[in-house]
Image (cartoon, rainbow, N blue to C red):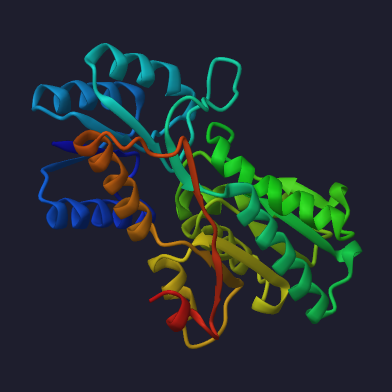
Amino acid sequence: MGSLIIPDATDNWWLREWDGARDSAERLGFTLITTEATDADKLLAAIDNHVAQGVKGILIGTPDTNLGPAIKNRCGTLGVRLYSVGNQFMDADNQPMKEVHFSGLAAYDIGVQVGEEMFAEAKRRGWKWEETGLMAMTIEELATAMERMGGSRDTLEKLGFPRAKMYDAPIRSWDSIGSFAAADIVITQHPEVKNWFVTASNDPIVAGAVRALEGRDFKAENIIGIGINGGQEARIEFEKSTPTGFYASMFVSGFDHGRMASERVFHWLKDGKEPPLDFRMTGTLATRDNFNEVMK
C-alpha cells in the first residue's frame, strides 16, 4: 500500500499528479491513498494516518519546502519509504536535501526556456527596454518556484534586458486571486512601464497577473505572460476568441509525472529497485497556435 499527499487539491498540476498515481495503482494492482495537506500540522497528521492504515511508501508534495527535516524524521521514525515530488525539501540551512529521493521539474532549466521565449517574442513585437518591466510573481517559501523565476531572470539579463527593470511581486496564495492582488501593487508602483513580462511558477498565477494588467487597460500586445504546467487554465486562455496577455505555457505532464513517481516507489518496495535520488522533467512551449498538439 502507498500514498500520495499533495499541498493543493484545487491546482490542476496536483490533480493530474493524483490521476497519474491512481492510474499506476490500478495497472500495477496496489492500493493508493490520496490526501491534501495544506500546512505542517495536516501533513504530519496525514503521514501518521497513512502509516496506521498500512502504507509502506509515501509520495509527498510539501506545502512548505522547509518542512523537509520534520517530514524526513517522521517517516524515518515510522519506518516508511519517503519520496518527495514537485517541491524539493530544504534543510535548516535552506539547502536542498539531496539525500531524500526527489522527482520534479527541471525548474531552473524551464525558467531559462521561459526567459528565452519572452526575449524572442518581445523582439518580434519591437518592445523597447526602457518602456518594459518584468513582473516576477514570487513565492519565497518554495525553492522550486524561485528556481523557475531565477532561470527566467538570469536568462533575460544575459540576453540584454536590464536587471533593474525586474520587479518582484510576492504572493500570499498560489492562485489567481493572490497573484491579482500582488500584481496590482507592482503596476501601481511602476506607472512608467508600458510593456510587461509576467513570469510565475504556474499558469493560474500568471493568469491572475494578466487579469490585473487588463484591469489597468493593458492590451494583449503589451503583455507577455508565460506560465508553467500547461494545465486547464492555459487551455482556457488559449481557447478564448481573442488573444490575451497569457501568451504561452511551458507544458509538463503532471499525469506522467505522478504515474512515473508512483511506479518508482512501487518497484522500490516490491523489487528492491531503488529509484534515482534526483529525477527532473523539462517542458515544451505551448501557445494558441500549437496547444492542441502539445497539450494532448
Identify which residue is drawn at 23% across, 42% down: 266
Compared with 133, 261 (above or below) is above
* Along the line of sight, the residue nearer the viewer: 290 or 272: 272
Q: Is residue 275 left or right of residue 217?
A: left
Residue 206 picture quarter:
bottom right
Would residue 118 be visible to someone looking at this image? yes
Compared with 106, 129 (above or below) is below
Q: Is residue 120 left or right of residue 273?
A: right
Q: Is residue 227 left or right of residue 268?
A: right
View extreme (top): residue:
77
| Residue 26, percent from left and from top | 13, 55
Compared with 73, 237 (above or below) is below
* Along the line of sight, the residue nearer the viewer: 194 or 22: 22
Q: Quadrant of the C terminus?
A: bottom left
Identify which residue is drawn at 38% across, 67% down: 232
Compared with 263, 226 (above or below) is below
* Along the line of sight, the residue nearer the viewer: 40 or 250: 250
| Residue 166, percent from left and from top | 78, 50
Q: Quadrant of the N terminus?
A: top left
Identify which residue is drawn at 46% across, 69% down: 234
| Residue 192, percent from left and from top | 84, 59
Would residue 185 be visible to someone looking at this image? no
Give the mark count.
Answer: 0
| Residue 123, percent from left and from top | 82, 75
Residue 43 picture quarter:
top left
Identify which residue is drawn at 56% across, 43% down: 145
